[in-house]
Amino acid sequence: MLARLRPFLQEYNAAELALEADAAVIIERGLEHGDVEVQRWLLRTYGEARLRAFVRAHGARRLSPRAFAYWQVVLKVDDAAPHPFGETARLLWGNRG
């Protein structure tokens, strides 16, 4: 299934990624770019609780705002950590993306 994510793992050798050791990057890229089959594979491989924990702890920082909002709803995450630079970035840059 990692072969389907290969275009989004360009800085890694996908053949050398380990499911546990590299789980954070695999989950990140799968949630952000994966199709339905990849998302099902993520659920089977890591489980809903682990995906929820990733979104809760790292989603604001490692996912796009759109993907983060989507996965918060899908995984019922209502207590996610805020983006560490959210307010600072908004003050510096305004609403530029």
Image (cartoon, rainbow, N blue to C red):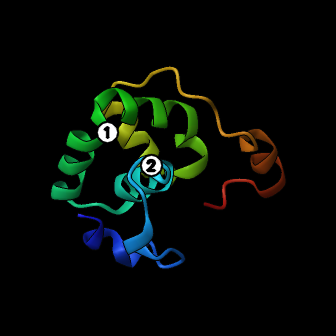
Q: In this rendering, is residue 1 above or below 60?
A: below
Q: Position of residue 88 (x, y in %)?
A: 82, 44
Q: Which residue is mark 1?
A: 46
**Quadrant in which the N terminus appears:** bottom left
- For marks 1 and 2, the one nearer the N-term is 2
Residue 32 figure quarter: bottom left
Q: Position of residue 36 (x, y in %)?
A: 17, 55
Q: Secondary structure at mark 1?
A: helix
Q: Measuring 24% from the left and 40% from the top, which residue is drawn there?
A: 43
Q: Which residue is mark 2?
A: 23
Using a 10 Å C-alpha cutoff, classify the residue at mark 2 as few (fewer than 14 neighbours), some (14 to 19) or many (20 or more).
Answer: some
Using the image as rendered, state which of residue 73 and residue 61 is in the foreground.
61
Callout 1–callout 2 Cβ contact below 8 Å: yes
Using the image as rendered, state which of residue 14 and residue 33 is in the foreground.
14
Q: Amino acid at mark 1?
A: Tyr
Q: Measuring 67% from the left and 54% from the top, which residue is drawn there?
A: 95
Position of 91 compared to 40: left or right?
Answer: right
Query: Disc number at residue 30?
Result: none
Q: Amino acid at mark 2?
A: Ala
Q: Measuring 71% from the left and 42% from the top, which residue is drawn there?
A: 86
Q: Secondary structure at mark 2?
A: helix
Q: Position of residue 75 (x, y in %)?
A: 32, 30
Using a 10 Å C-alpha cutoff, classify the residue at mark 1 as few (fewer than 14 neighbours), some (14 to 19) or many (20 or more).
Answer: some
Between the residue at mark 1 and the residue at mark 2, the CA separation in whole angstroms equals: 8 Å
Q: Position of residue 61 (x, y in %)?
A: 61, 46
Using the image as rendered, state which of residue 47 and residue 60 is in the foreground.
47
Q: In this rendering, is residue 46 above or below 67?
A: above
Position of 50 compared to 61: left or right?
Answer: left
